[in-house]
Image: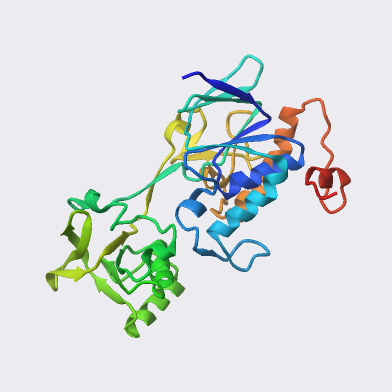
Amino acid sequence: MTKQRIATDAVIIGAGPVGLFAVFELGLLGLKSQVVDILDKPGGQCAELYPEKPIYDIPALPVVSGGELVERLLQQCEPFDPQFHLGQMAEKLEKLDNGHWLLTTDLGMELEAPVIVVAAGGGSFVPKKPPIAGIEAYEGGAVHYAVRKMETFRDKHLVIAGGGDSALDWTLNLQPVAASITLVHRRPDFRAAPDSVDKMHALAEAGKIKFLIAQIAGLEGDGGRLTGVKLKSPEAGEWVVPCDTLLPFYGLTMKLGPIADFGLNLHENHIAVDTEKFETSVPQIFAIGDINSYPGKLKLILSGFHEAALMAQQAFHYVHPDKKLRFQYTTSSSELQQRLKVA
């Protein structure tokens, strides 16, 4: 394959909300970005795992779905014409003689820039699959590890398995849509928001869903068509719950992939950074969002936004070492307003 090399100011690894806001913050300072993401669309976990799930802690937006947040961020960074290289993994990173970095993807794309920004969340994420014999035959049809569109599950008879936020959230959100929902968890305690647990119990008491303390022992069906989920518990033994769809939410396995080989200071699959510039142990490489680690770190989207803003300030000095950076406000700076195409 013939390699194509693109020169830019900053290469951002990860097109989630924090990566998209990094495009904006860099753009305000006149810096161009190229964005690489292993998914086939921008948005990261918001687009892949919960595009219709409401988010309540984005400043000035009392409630916004994951999908809408991504759309707004794409609209916000549009004036800076970011280039997205989707469905590609950042595979190799090397330092060039001119002081720039050369990032190569698994599809042979070469991106050269003085600045690299790792905004890869927890890395590449894959669902933890339940150890159920033959489950592969039902995947993509009757078994789903994420909810992309709620309409997919309209009038379905669902079994939802798990004890975390995803299992509880989708039990609550899909209840008005599905024909029936049975929530299965191996114990009465949950690792989810207490309010969600209370709402789930209220639905169960009202007879609108079923909650069973049990483990999944197997699947029943034929030709990829699911007819029931076999459950077991010490008290009740084994029995079958009729259903046509299984949603197992057992969490995600995060894998850094090739980023682990970039020579960065890693601790438990997170990249250590300072809190002034959010720069890694390697100059000119930054890490923002859930991928980074520092004292007091909060894994919130709004924290990643703050980190992106400070990262961009230092990135400017690497791209333009001979220029002075003048701090400006978008409300009063005609220069920034021209970059935003609102002047």
Residue at (66% x, 42% y) in the render: 23
- Residue 67 in percent (x, y) is at 54, 57
Q: Is residue 93 above or below residue 205?
A: above
Residue at (54% x, 49% y) in the render: 43
Q: Is residue 211 left or right of residue 12?
A: left
- Residue 37 in percent (x, y) is at 51, 39
Number of labels in the image equals 0
Q: Name the image quarter holding residue 160.
A: bottom left
Q: Is residue 298 left or right of residue 173?
A: right
Residue 306 in view, yes or no? yes
Residue 276 in view, yes or no? no
- Residue at the outermost bottom position: 206
Q: Is residue 13 left or right of residue 197?
A: right
Q: Nearer the viewer, residue 33 or 192?
A: 33
Q: Name the image quarter holding residue 34.
A: top right
Q: Nearer the viewer, residue 288 or 206?
A: 206
- Residue 231 in percent (x, y) is at 18, 66
- Residue at the outermost left position: 237
- Residue 215 in percent (x, y) is at 21, 63
Q: How is the image coloured?
A: rainbow
Residue at (32% x, 52% y) in the render: 140
